[in-house]
Amino acid sequence: MSTEMQRRAFLAAGAVSIPSIALARTGQVGMEADRGMQFHKLMGQSGDHLKSMRRYLRDLEAPGARAEAAFLANQVTILLAQCVMVADQESIPVQSVEKYDGDKERFVTDMQIKLMSAVSASNALGRQLLLGNDEEAISIYGDLRRERNEGHDEFISEDD
Ligand code: HEM
């Protein structure tokens, strides 16, 4: 296997594979399919990929840059989508204790809605990169960072 292929296989392994049998009988959240996935680790990996993408975005004309950036954007999409699945691992942050008044389900749903918006942005980013629409891609990259900052302000506890 070439070094590049090994690197990709390694990165891809970061997105936890989901047995199709587990997915087939879903409808409920937080079951077999979620085993082994840890919200904060998935988030950490998506953050690393977003960071790695930056150097490619600085020079999209460089050989292979668009494909590399699109690959990383797709990893972010997958990892954030997995965060949606295990969002119930997170606790209501201190700054929102009053807002939710113990309603964990509503909190999880709100976080999933926000996460799904970031999933859409990273998916759109990968697509625009493959299409070669560089300006649009760079603008969506900015949107994705904004989504992240907003998500963190709202959903990470001010205590942390
Ligand atoms: C827009 C919706 C988002 C929400 C609601 C959200 C929520 C959270 C929460 C609750 C944590 C704390 C996890 C914990 O310590 O248990 C976290 C951590 C983190 N998030 Fe996000 N996030 C969002 C988007 C993103 C995006 C787009 C990125 C980067 C691609 C990102 C990167 C990270 C990183 C690097 C951490 C620290 C992980 C660690 O503990 O090692 N987040 N996020």
Image (spheres, helix red, strand yellow):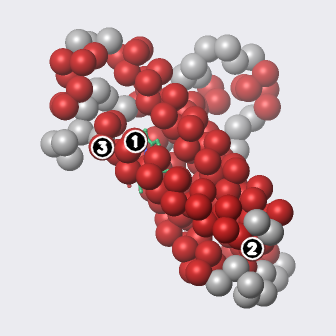
Q: Which mark is residue 136?
A: none
Q: Is mark 1 within 8 Å of ligand 1?
A: yes
**Which three-letter amino acid code belongs to the residue tagged 3?**
Asp
- SS state under label 2: helix
> Mark 1 to mark 3: distance in Å?
6 Å
- In percent of width and height, residue 46 lies at 53, 56
- Label 2 crowding class (10 Å Cα cut-off): few <14, some 14-19, many 20+? many
Q: Residue most toward the bottom?
A: 62
Image quarter of the N terminus: bottom right
- Asked if residue 58 can be seen in this view, the reply is yes
At horizontal 78% and vertical 87% (from top left) the residue drawn is 63
Q: Which residue is mark 1?
A: 151
87 vs 59, nearest the viewer: 59
Q: Which residue is mark 3?
A: 153
**Which three-letter amino acid code belongs to the residue tagged 1?**
Gly
Q: Is mark 3 within 8 Å of ligand 1?
A: no
Q: Earlier in the sequence, mark 3 or mark 2?
A: 2
At horizontal 78% and vertical 21% (from top left) the residue drawn is 24
> Mark 3 to mark 2: distance in Å?
31 Å
Q: Which mark is residue 66?
A: 2
**Which three-letter amino acid code belongs to the residue tagged 2?**
Arg
Quick check: 153 above or below 86? below
Q: Residue most toward the front?
A: 135
Q: Residue most toward the left?
A: 159
Q: Is residue 102 left or right of residue 125?
A: left
At horizontal 31% and vertical 29% (from top left) the residue drawn is 91
